[in-house]
Image: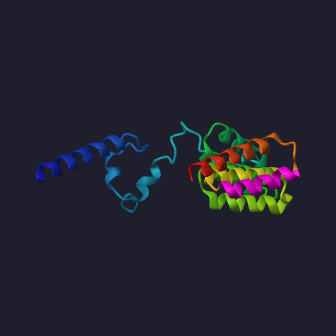
Amino acid sequence: MGARATRVLLATAACLLWLNGCESSTRLGDLFQSKADTGAAAQDDPIATGSVRPTPRDPPAAAKASPDDELSLGKKYFQAGNFGLAERHFRRAVELHPRDLESWMGLAAAYDRQRRFDLADRAYDQATKIAGPTAEILNNRGYSYMLRGDARRARETLLEAQARDPGNTYIKNNLETVEASLRKSKATQ
């Protein structure tokens, strides 16, 4: 155990010496002194070497993303199948613009794809508060129930969506999928 501890100590000392080369100070002893020990001598060293311009900690207000930027990024990541990043950007869009229906719908869909159905339900509830139970919201919520394996609830919700928009092909396709699932489950019983 003693030989191993010695090797670790030597490796640590070597790393500290190597890292000391990254310091802007030219005094090797500065690495082993605290700021209080160095006193006025530490003020002789420049704060920055001047080779890199300091960047502000917070970007200016103009550089911060707008709700439209966040929504666009959310859509981009959703289409790419990166639902975690899509959720993050949709959530930011909703925080910046809480009455934006499209952001809430994107957030709900991202939560569905992450199988975070409790959060998806909250997002669908917010969307419904904004626009009422539209065919699109009902269709997406019905699809959410399909993802959960709740075919009966999905069918009820999709039938309500179809009543509001009978010609919608997305609703029709989702209903056909649910009906096939229900027929298949009846056949196996």
Q: On screen, 23 above or below 104?
A: above
Residue 124 picture quarter: bottom right
Give me the residue at 60% from left, 48% from top: 187
Decide whether residue 152 is among the magenta residues. yes
Provide residue 128's location: percent of width, then percent of height: 80, 60
- On screen, residue 90 versus residue 55, left or right, reads right
Instruction: State whether the magenta stretch is mostly helix, strand or loop.
Output: helix
Q: Nearer the viewer, residue 135 or 86?
A: 135
Q: How is the image coloured?
A: rainbow
Q: Nearer the viewer, residue 110 or 34?
A: 110
Provide residue 67's location: percent of width, then percent of height: 77, 50
- On screen, residue 91 versus residue 135, left or right, reads left
Give me the residue at 46% from left, 47% from top: 45
Question: How many numbered markers are drawn?
Answer: 0
- On screen, residue 72 versus residue 38, left or right, reads right
Provide residue 123's location: percent of width, then percent of height: 72, 59
Give me the residue at 70% from left, 62% from top: 122
Q: Can residue 101 be seen in this snapshot? A: no
Q: Can residue 77 be seen in this snapshot? A: yes
Q: Nearer the viewer, residue 1 or 48?
A: 1
Give me the residue at 79% from left, 56% from top: 97
Residue 53 picture quarter: top right
Decide whether residue 137 is among the magenta residues. no
**Magenta region: which residues?**
151-164
Provide residue 30's location: percent of width, then percent of height: 35, 51
